[in-house]
Image (spheres, coloured by chain):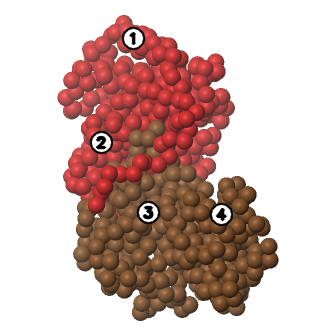
Chain colours: A brown, B red
Amino acid sequence: MNRQGIAESLRDGIAEEMERDASVFCMGEDIGVVGGWGGAFTVTLGLEKRFPDRMIDTPIAELGFFGAAVGAAMMGMRPIVDVQYGDFLFLAMDQIVNNAAKMRYMSGGKIKVPMVMRAPIGATGRGSQHAQSMERYFTGVPGIKVVAVSDAYDAKGILKAAVRDDNPVLMFEHKLLYGSKGARAESGAVDATRDIPEEDYTVPLDKAAVRGEGTDLTIIGWLLMLHYASDAREKLAASGVSAEVIDLRSLNPIDYETIGESVRKTGRVVIVEEGPKTGGVSAELAAGITERFGESLRCPIVRVASPDVPVPFTPILENAYRPDVPRIMEACARVMQF
Amino acid sequence: MTVATHNIDAGSVAYTPPFLLELYRKMVVIREFEDGVKFLFLEGSMPGTIHQCQGQEATAVGVCAALRGDDFITSTFRGHGHALAKGLTVNELLFELFGASTGCCAGKGGSMHVGNMDKGMVPGIAIVAGGVPLAAGMGLAFKMQKSPQIVACFFGDGAVAEGAFHEGINLAAIWNLPVIFVCENNLYGASTRIDKVMKIPVVAERAKSYGIRGQTVDGNDVLKVYEATLHAADECRRGQGPVLLELLTYRRTGHSRRDPCHYQPKDEREQWAMHDPIDRFGKFLVQRGEIDEAGMQVIRTTVISEFNASVAEARRQPMPTVGDLTTDVFAPAAEDRS
């Protein structure tokens, strides 16, 4: 066992997969520059020394290198591509949505596109264009698996499962959860370190995880919001409310089996999402839960999300933008009235 | 832009008669396929829309004749000619256009996405320039795998204005990838003439800005196209790629469906019609004594009767069932890759 943060566990996971399979390679901006940063959040730091031919630094050309990753994947390679900030995925949108996601279907099931896309997201003091929560733009695209990792154990296991999967997998990571060190450390970071086993392991791409059992209500979150939900759970326990917390992990497909078990038990649901409320993943979740388990619900589902505004810069506004523990508690209090 | 007026000559290349006659036959196959499909479409036998390549047969046939069987091409929404030139059968192509489950993409691709990976053709990328970064990535895979394979990436003059063109070619250039970027310059992006959208009218000149070789070729001279591609392919296999080939040609039919082409000036159409790639090559073959008028008529008649037989078969092909709607979205779980 070895205590690691997400940046470190991802780094080990990538290195182990590259060691195991010569077709795995990394491609992105500033990922393998000697004397550089190992990507924007240190995840690939030092890997260029171990894999000089498979850490491919690109020009600033997201459309180009995401397309190149699709092409390489179709020809038998297993690229791991990343953007420095999730917001830049918009530049690569055509290649992700029109090529990566559809190539298998359009070919009548002949083509495989085994590629991993990594994207750091979340409001972190950088203003509107390095801050968006991008999940919503991809969860409705058939042909891509979408995952979100909230701790170092899952990060490594999901990364490995994604590399071994024969489909495009888009993996969201939160800037406040990396545990990046030195000059790349983030203020406001939350501890997502875990004990990482020595042996090889994977975490399934399509399963949610119960992070704390409870009987009165179900709180669903992912990434940073999962941690806030767990904090809220502890506070609720002090006042005698037993909350079950679910880490969604897989945003597409959604694990309604795990969610259903919880909802049938509690009958009350709060969904927490960083990002504007309108059109969010929580909207899909609320609809999906209502369709499937509506008869088990004792009250309407409540969503805690950001207001429908761009991410602001100044801390007082940014903190108001990002859902926090008090707002989650408020929502829980609302459903507990029923 | 002037129309090439020279007669085709074989220069110093020693061509065998069967090779030359096969080039001719393939061009006739494409022409008759396109004319036949146009009729079927207009009479309502075929669903969807069509983008055809009458007048551009020499680009597809010349390029593909210079490639090896395991080399790849990427294509566009105007891909019927590329497909037939790369070795797809009239049957698998026509069945796909009819939407049958026996088509080359099981009816899920359609006219704009025809392809067959076993024959070295990626399903057509119908987003303009979308295949350019993809081809770079395929070339990257071949280079990393130390494979001698190369990619020929077809696109039109309209693609040159897209960001993907710039990003994809630049990636191929900086990494010396084995990709021939084949611009079929037919003077029009849909209805817009290139002089409205390009300050530099010679597409091949752009190669300089990427530090690669560019060449403009008479795209209605199948031998010139073949020789230029052979040369470029050789450079790519020796690690001296990529190359940008600009093939000057002309579309003798509408952009799509019922487009009557009123934007193409009459004198321009007539001038290019005088230099039709099939007529020109036929004249060359007659002058060389490879064939006479009667022989050419036999080829045409045979091709037409084969096409008609395919149409009759196409009308009897099984359609996909509704159950096929939801298959082929994801590749199934791979065998244990650990």
Q: Nearer the viewer, residue A9 or B87?
A: A9
Q: Residue A252 location in percent, x, y?
A: 55, 59
Under mark 4, the amino acid is Arg
Q: Which of the labelled discs sits on residue B302, or is there none?
A: 1
Judging by the rendered image, the residue that carries numbered circle 3 is A204
In this rendering, which labeled residue sits more in front, label 3 or label 4? 4
Q: Give me the chain letter of mark 2.
A: B
Q: Residue lying furthest right in this view?
A: A337
Quadrant holding the C terminus of chain A: bottom right
Quarter occupied by residue A237: bottom right
Quarter occupied by residue B27: top left
Identity of the residue drawn at 50% across and 41% down: B327
Mark 4 to mark 2: distance in Å? 56 Å
Mark 1 to mark 4: distance in Å? 69 Å
Judging by the rendered image, the residue that carries numbered circle 4 is A264
Mark 1 to mark 3: distance in Å? 57 Å
Q: Give me the chain letter of mark 1.
A: B
Q: Nearer the viewer, residue A302 or B36?
A: A302
Q: Residue B263 location in percent, x, y?
A: 65, 35
Under mark 1, the amino acid is Thr
Under mark 2, the amino acid is Asp
Q: Are marks 2 and 3 in contact (CB under 8 Å)?
A: no
